[in-house]
Amino acid sequence: MTLDADVVRGVPGVRSLPRIPQLDGVRAVAISLVVCLHLSPQLFPGAFIGVDIFFVLSGFLITVVLLNSVRSDGSLSYRKFYLRRARRLLPAVSVLLIADLIHAIVATNGRLLLAHLITVAGAFLYVINWAGAFGHDVPWQMDHLWSLSVEEQFYLCWPVVLMFLVRRLPARRALLVTGGIAALSWVLRAAVWAPSREGLAYASTVTRADGLLLGCMLGQAYARRLCDDLLRALRRRAVGWGALAGILVLVPHISQTHAAAYFFSMGIAGIFSGLLIAHMVGDGTSAAPGGVARLLGARPVTALGRRAYSIYLWQNPIMFWLSGPLRVSPARWPVNIAATLICAELSYRLIERPFLRLPV
């Protein structure tokens, strides 16, 4: 993600973010884990942490963008920020929701169609996570949209909170306050969790905000030049390999149904994700080193990462639509992946990119 050239910086000494292909590589890791979870939760029980990677990366990028968008008088155009978010997200998800509604009209009865209409409305309004949080059944081809709802609810609040912190507190104290709120979210998730409240701990915005806030901390540290010595130290190859290995080691050893995921694993996954992102970004003064940065910067990997949003949207519904004829077929994986990549490519080229070119 790059920043607009016409941004006037109102936060003293703020640093912009150059184009870093390896961040698309981080997205590729996240979306690969999510796809593996959907296709085979028995083999990859902990791959839900792909969502935690998305959360941390999103919080980082949005915070850097916001800090670089503050005007010279200290104000921020909230209208422009939210229009950009809508332009980025709504067109592609709207097409998906229309496709699912058409499928529901053709393939389901009146009662199920009503459930689909409610689901589509909840997804479009970015509140569908609360249905799962309070134990209501969400059609499983749409239940992956909960994470988009968490993000958008968070971003209704974060720009206002960030501007308050920037205006009222020294930079380092603002960073500590952000960290304190992140820790509170982690503690709330652990406190809320019980077998009967798993949905609430897993899908509510307040119990999943720690990953986003961890990214927001990293964004403040980077953009406001608060920890440059540490960021330079995190460029060592061992840090990159260690962070990626830590994420991958968690996948087969944790489960969404176990208490440890809520007490420890999700938070630890967020920390590994933050380390991986910091390794790629550093202090903005040098190119990413070799090792894992070379791996995640490879063209096929970054291409996959650029299409991560469309892949995330389409893979679960396609798996549902093909579940009848391919439920026990050995072709289930390759057919689902191929169909997902085709739909994602069409969505990326015909919907995402054209809308992103529109002025705000």
Image (tube, helix red, strand yellow):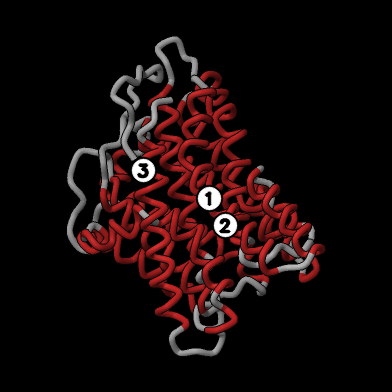
Identify residue for label 3. 353
Question: Label 2 sits on what residue type?
Answer: Ala
Identify residue for label 1. 95
Q: Position of residue 47 (x, y in %)?
A: 50, 70
Q: Nearer the viewer, mark 2 or mark 3?
A: 2
Are the residues at dot 1 and dot 2 in contact (C-beta closer than 8 Å)?
yes
Q: Position of residue 303 (x, y in %)?
A: 29, 57
Q: Is residue 122 above or below residue 36?
A: above
Residue in front for this viewpoint, 259 or 152: 152
Q: Position of residue 111 (x, y in %)?
A: 82, 63
Instruction: Measure the C-alpha gap from mark 3 to mark 1.
Output: 14 Å
Question: Label 3 sits on what residue type?
Answer: Arg
Q: Nearer the viewer, mark 3 or mark 1?
A: 1
* Numbered disc 2: secondary structure: helix
Q: Residue 239 sits in which quadrant?
A: bottom left
- The disc placed on residue 99 is 2
